[in-house]
DNA sequence: TACAATTTAATTGAACTCAATCATATTGAG
DNA sequence: CTCAATATGATTGAGTTCAATTAAATTGTA
């Protein structure tokens, strides 16, 4: 008779479909990002820099929810590809400023189509997408 | 006047808060999983095995949305900790069967509290959580 | 001014993730 | 039956992720 709710079932974990979904969608980015020679992590760094032109590493860590152990090698790689430059702040030598280069800024033209392509892969009603954003940012802000 | 919608803004990406949320929640698991000497990936393998007792690697890959390149070293590690055993199928030598050990099964008692603890960390209304599940599984099934 | 506390990145080590490739076993077509 | 196609895991290499620690610069306080 009793269909007891088992919290230890995979389907009853909040985190599992969240993480699996994120990875599945990141896979969908790959063919598009390959054309720009960017990884997903490099891409989200570029999203910030296309918007802001320059940003301190500590600010980038906060914006992307990543730590310096993750971003330091990513940013060095991007500098070697001449998408960015990294310079210490004059006012405070502890602070490392990341600036977009012309080459990095130019790459934006080739990226504008990507959100549309991904949106085409992930079929959600507009109100579902809106609700999803709302809940995810509610969790992130906790 | 015009506030044109910019699809290349970080806040307008679907994947970004999804992935960030997943990682933030996985971080919340850590103190609880440390007590069981499990990583998050090992934990979701155990979730399957507490339910099914045994499973083929290819089936585990499908269930967890992970590939053999990820799971092979994870399963070897779990075998070295005697939580599982790995044996080739008699009927088809290509198939590797993963079975839970008594030690692995016993660990379940220490894990039952974890979903409740995590639920306490992630504050969502029941209907929000239900909607979130629905949307995430809709995406995963695409 | 001194010097402890704090801030900021970098480094290190362990683990995860996936694409591409490989080796082995099984299946299927002729 | 034979051999090509397929299925299954394992391996490899590049990259991501984070905890813990370290090094350097700045700030605050006595």
Image: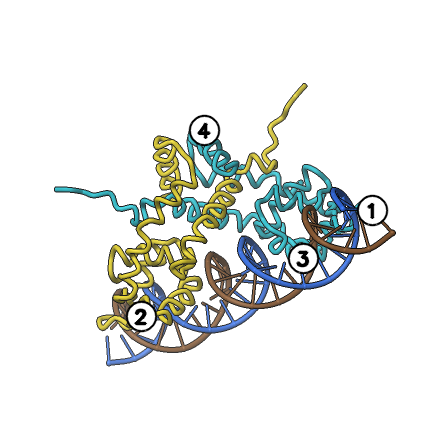
Chain colours: A cyan, B yellow, C brown, D blue
The residues tagged by marks 4 and 2 sit, at their Cα atoms, a distance apart of 45 Å
Numbered-mark total? 4
Q: Residue at x 36, y 41 (%)?
A: B137
Which of the pair D5/B129 is nearer the observer? B129
A102 versus C13 height, above or below: above
How far across and how far down the image is residue B74, in percent? Answer: 41, 64
Closer to the chain start, of discs 1 and 3, is: 3
* B8 relative position to B78: left or right: right
Q: Which residue in the structure is indicated by mark 4?
A: A126
* A73 relative position to D16: left or right: right
| Mark identifier at residue A77 | 3
| Mark identifier at residue A90 | 1
The residues tagged by marks 3 and 2 sit, at their Cα atoms, a distance apart of 39 Å
Q: Residues within 10 Å of mark 4 (few under 14, many from 20)?
A: few
Residues at badges 4 and 1 in contact (C-beta under 8 Å)?
no
Quadrant assignment, res B106? bottom left
Q: Please name which of the two marks, 2 or 1, marks the residue nearer to the observer.
A: 1
Is disc 2 on the same chain as disc 3? no
Q: Which residue in the structure is indicated by mark 2?
A: B86
């Amino acid at each position: 008779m009793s269909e007891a709710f088992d919290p230890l079932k995979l389907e009853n974990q909040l985190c599992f479909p969240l993480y699996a979904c994120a990875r599945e969608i990141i896979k969908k980015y790959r063919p598009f990002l390959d054309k720009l020679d960017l990884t997903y992590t490099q891409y989200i760094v570029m999203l910030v820099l296309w918007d802001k032109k320059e940003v301190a590493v500590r600010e980038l860590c906060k914006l992307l929810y990543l730590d310096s152990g993750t971003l330091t090698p990513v940013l060095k790689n991007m500098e070697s590809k001449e998408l960015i430059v990294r310079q210490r702040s004059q006012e405070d030598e502890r602070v490392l400023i990341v600036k977009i280069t012309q080459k990095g800024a130019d790459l934006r033209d080739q990226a504008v189509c990507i959100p549309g392509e991904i949106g085409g892969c992930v079929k959600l009603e507009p109100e579902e997408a809106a609700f999803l954003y709302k809940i995810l940012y509610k969790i992130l802000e906790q």
